[in-house]
Amino acid sequence: MPTESSPSPIIEIVNVTKIYEEYESRVTALKNVSLTINSGEFVAIVGTSGCGKSTLLHCMGLLDRPTSGKIYIEGKDTEQITGKEIAAFRGKRMGFVFQNYNLIPRLTVLENTMLPGLIAGKGVGQLKEKALKLLREVGISHRAHHKGVHLSGGEQQRVAIARALINDPIIVLADEPTGALDSKSSTEIMELLENLNENKGVTIVFVSHDVEIARYGKRRVELKDGRIVTDRKVEKKQQEKVE
């Protein structure tokens, strides 16, 4: 529990275990994991393929449910959020950035960015103004009226970041945000996320198996075989050593 002098956690994960069962197969993806994410943090969740990092992120974002344990978001026990409430809660409180962008090809960049706000019931006029502002901030406003299918990977990911911010989420969760990008685009996307964290105060948790990408995190959580093996803050000098 936070003290008066410590920040209140945005997300608190307590003794979470996640088991996948299919036919006679049983895989324990997370084993008794506990983790707290506070406001303003920029956290890298790292580890080799299959270590459980994406599963952890998906549980944080209510895209998956733990087999046991508790997840609290702003102090609310997420077990109490069920059915249609989950999607509404997620849409209003969280922003997501995925490896494959998940843009709707037939919609324009502007329409893709506005979509979560429209789903949340916000007015078109206000949303359009905000979406254009976000597209300027992520450096893609000149493509606002182009369809997603005509964009490069790096451009699509910029749109995905703007879309993730449209509802003023308490946190942005990014699952391998550079996994489908070349090295130049990867650097640009991570510098963009870094800027959003440092200058806008956006709380960000991202997953990566890439050491070069993980260096951007100011806190590094390493998983191995479904367990957290290290959790430490990273000084700027230590971040730069990986370059």
Image (tube, helix red, strand yellow):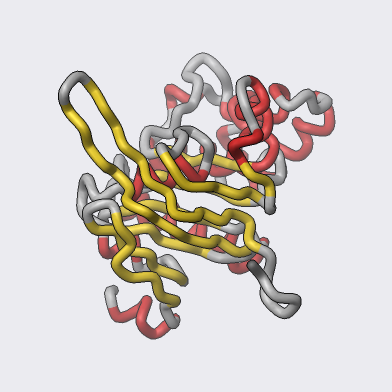
Q: Which quarter of the image is occupied by the C terminus?
A: bottom left
Q: Is residue 40 above or below residue 109?
A: below
Q: Residue at x 44, y 70 (%)?
A: 219
Q: Is residue 130 left or right of residue 108?
A: right
Q: In front: 228, or 106?
A: 228
Q: In front: 77, or 181?
A: 77
Whether residue 94 is visible to the viewer of this picture, yes or no, is yes
Q: Is residue 44 left or right of residue 180?
A: right
Locate residue 173, reporting x and y percent.
50, 47
Locate residue 181, reporting x and y percent.
31, 44
**Image quadrant of residue 116?**
top right
Q: Residue at x 37, y 33 (%)?
A: 100
**Image quadrant of residue 152?**
top left
Q: Is residue 165 above or below residue 116?
A: below
Locate residue 171, reporting x and y percent.
60, 51
Q: In front: 93, or 167?
A: 93
Q: Which quarter of the image is occupied by the N terminus?
A: bottom right
Q: Is residue 32 left or right of residue 173?
A: left
**Image quadrant of residue 118?**
top right
Taking the view exactly as shown, the residue that stands out farthest to the bottom is 237
Q: In front: 30, or 187?
A: 30
Locate residue 130, reporting x and y percent.
75, 39
